[in-house]
Image: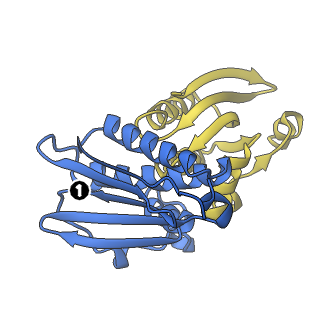
């Protein structure tokens, strides 16, 4: 395997929609640098955006005193996106199933479902205070070679 | 790119040509206001042309559902036209594709309201 061009980026941002856009752009860049094709890049970027929106909106509730932190890494085998808020935390296992007939017409509740659908692994960790979501996409052999 | 919405009338159907992204903070509010405006003016047949919408997030999906239920509750019909592959994929994944009437060509969509 050639040098996988490992890349790491860490940043701490205010709880704003501009931060969501910044995180989304950084994820897109990391995926593009890893040689991931456009369709897969779209899915990865969307998952990361949903995680960032969760952190800013549901986690920190747009509180300017609270930060969103993001740690992105390409370790040569996977792309890892860790996004943390400083909110109260949520029991992720108790979120309603957005595909259930009774939930299909709900206006909210699809973000975590999309994240889980688009990524290979999703991990939740309670912080003191806050929640960290770690999204992992395994690199295919072709992408690993770039 | 933020969402832009252009409105036109065709055989009694209000067609909204949407272009850009339907996401939290970028298009959700515009779409909600456009639908509410149409409903308040008495529009009963609304066709959302999504041919130039290349991105929708969970908030945007929520707005589409909200538009659909708002229209239905007011006795109006809301249908979708010209889904891009990315939007279609997300609608299928979330099973919302089964909720909406979706059309690939405008003439058929317009005719379906009669």
Residue A72, quarter of the rendered image: bottom left
Q: Nearer the viewer, residue A76 or A123?
A: A76
Apparent colour of chain A: blue
Residue B68 picture location, percent across and down: 59, 48
Apparent colour of chain B: yellow
Q: Residue at x 40, y 57 (%)?
A: A73
Mark 1 residue crowding within 10 angstroms, few (<14) / some (14–19) / many (20+): many
Query: Is A140 left or right of A126, judged from the image as shown?
Result: right
- Colour theme: by chain
Q: Please count the marks in the image.
A: 1
Residue for badge 1: A85
Q: Residue at x 52, y 34 (%)?
A: B31
Query: Is B95 left or right of A21, judged from the image as shown?
Result: right
Q: Nearer the viewer, residue A57 or B5?
A: A57
Q: Residue at x 33, y 38 (%)?
A: A17
Residue B112, quarter of the rendered image: top right
Q: Residue at x 65, y 22 (%)?
A: B7
Query: Is A120 left or right of A122, judged from the image as shown?
Result: right
Q: Among all residues in the image, which is located at the extreme bottom?
A: A93
Can residue B99 be seen in the rendering of this structure? no
Q: Quadrant of the C terminus of chain B?
A: top right
Determine whether A78 is above or below B104 in the image: below
Secondary structure beneath label 1: loop
Q: Among all residues in the image, which is located at the extreme front?
A: A2
Determine whether A30 is above or below B12 in the image: below
Q: Chain of mark 1?
A: A
Q: Nearer the viewer, residue A113 or B102?
A: A113
Residue B33 picture location, percent across and down: 47, 31
Residue A5 picture location, percent across and down: 49, 52
Can residue B2 be seen in the rendering of this structure? yes
């Amino acid at each position: 395997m050639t040098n996988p061009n490992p890349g790491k980026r860490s940043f701490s941002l205010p709880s704003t929609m501009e931060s969501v856009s910044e995180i989304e752009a950084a994820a897109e860049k990391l995926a593009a640098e890893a040689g991931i094709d456009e369709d897969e890049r779209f899915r990865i970027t969307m998952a990361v955006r949903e995680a960032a929106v969760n952190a800013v909106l549901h986690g920190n509730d747009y509180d300017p005193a609270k930060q969103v932190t993001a740690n992105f890494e390409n370790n040569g085998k996977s792309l890892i996106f860790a996004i943390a808020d400083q909110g109260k935390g949520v029991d992720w296992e108790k979120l309603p199933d957005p595909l259930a007939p009774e939930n299909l017409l709900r206006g909210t509740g699809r973000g975590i479902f999309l994240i889980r659908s688009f990524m290979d692994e999703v991990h939740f960790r309670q912080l003191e205070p806050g929640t960290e979501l770690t999204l992992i996409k395994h690199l295919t052999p072709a992408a690993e070679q770039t | 790119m933020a969402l832009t919405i252009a409105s036109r009338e065709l055989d009694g159907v209000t067609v909204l040509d949407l272009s850009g992204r339907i996401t939290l903070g970028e298009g959700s509010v515009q779409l909600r206001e456009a639908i509410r405006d149409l409903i308040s003016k008495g529009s009963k047949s609304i066709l959302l042309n999504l041919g130039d919408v290349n991105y929708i997030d969970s908030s945007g999906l929520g707005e589409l559902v909200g538009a659909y239920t708002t229209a239905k509750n007011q006795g109006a019909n809301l249908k979708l036209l010209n889904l891009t592959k990315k939007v279609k994929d997300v609608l299928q994944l979330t099973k919302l594709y089964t909720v909406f009437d979706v059309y690939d060509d405008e003439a058929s969509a317009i005719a379906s309201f009669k």
